[in-house]
Amino acid sequence: MSNLDCKYLDIPSADGSAVRAYMARPVGRGVLPVLLVLQEAFGVNAHIRQVAERFAAGLGYLAIAPELFHRTAPGIEGDYNDFTGVMEHVRALTEEGMSADFTGVYNWIRGQEAVDCEMVGAVGFCMGGRAAFLCNSVLPLKAAVSYYGGGIAPGLLGRAPAMQGPILLFWGGMDQHIGPEQRRAVSDALCDAGKKYVAVEFSDAQHGFFCDVRPSYNPDAAIQSWALTVEFFKAYLK
């Protein structure tokens, strides 16, 4: 896209490792709010890069997608039909490692010109939905959006009291990976912690409904969730 500056960066993680990240930013738009775009289990692939570019080109964000698998498989782009091929990298992720990466990216943001480091949010999909929940407990985010974040319940429920910004959660009613009891547990934890949240369930959507290259893609749910995401971030990051 000619009106975008898109490139890969190497950013120091807070634990001393190096995080490769894909950055997209509009050219000539002044001071920009920032979004961390957090990957599915299949890496910072063409789909995730396209999402980052949508936020940058159409909405005026500096969007940055860190490679969360940089310790075990830098640059990996998994096959949507071969989940087992990425599972070892998913299992290798730790809260400590991801927290260090988020902190490193945030420190990088704070050192950039023409960005508003007080207006930072995160959005994530699948594994990245869980990562967005974690990120919102680590960084002073203004808002976060989690798409079908598997493993938030029960693994991250203890972090609900540490949520920094309001969070929007999307779920698929037909998701075979995240059952209704898990979805309720996330809402209950946020409610008990007195945190501002919105939970949206698309009754006819499956896991991965936003990604248009997955068999579970649901165009209606994708369009509607995108519109809600845009408005949610407008409310808190503009």
Image: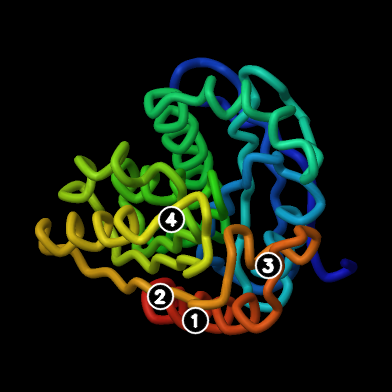
Q: In which quadrant will I find the C terminus? A: bottom left
Q: Nearer the viewer, mark 2 or mark 4?
A: 2
Element marked by disc 1: helix
Q: Where is residue 184 shown, x and y percent of the image?
A: 27, 61
| Residue 73 horizontal side relative to residue 230, left or right | right
Q: Quadrant of residue 107?
A: top left
Q: Which residue is mark 4?
A: 117
User: Number of labelled discs?
Assistant: 4
Q: Residue at x 30, y 56 (%)?
A: 181
Q: Nearer the viewer, mark 1 or mark 4?
A: 1
Q: Are marks 3 and 2 in contact (CB under 8 Å)?
A: no
**Which amino acid type is shown beneath numbered disc 1?**
Leu
Q: Which residue is mark 1?
A: 228
Distance of label 3 from label 4 (alpha carbons): 16 Å
| Residue 74 horizontal side relative to residue 19, left or right | right
Q: Where is residue 163 shown, x and y percent of the image?
A: 24, 52
Which comes sooner in the sequence, label 2 or label 4? 4
**Which amino acid type is shown beneath numbered disc 2?**
Val
Q: Residue at x 20, y 47 (%)?
A: 162
Element marked by disc 3: helix
Element marked by disc 4: strand
**Which amino acid type is shown beneath numbered disc 4?**
Cys
> Which residue reaches farthest right?
2
Q: Where is residue 85 shown, x and y percent of the image?
A: 74, 28
Q: Are marks 2 and 1 in contact (CB under 8 Å)?
A: yes
Q: Residue at x 64, y 35 (%)?
A: 67
Q: Which residue is mark 2?
A: 200
Which mark identifies residue 56? 3
| Residue 210 horizontal side relative to residue 15, left or right | right
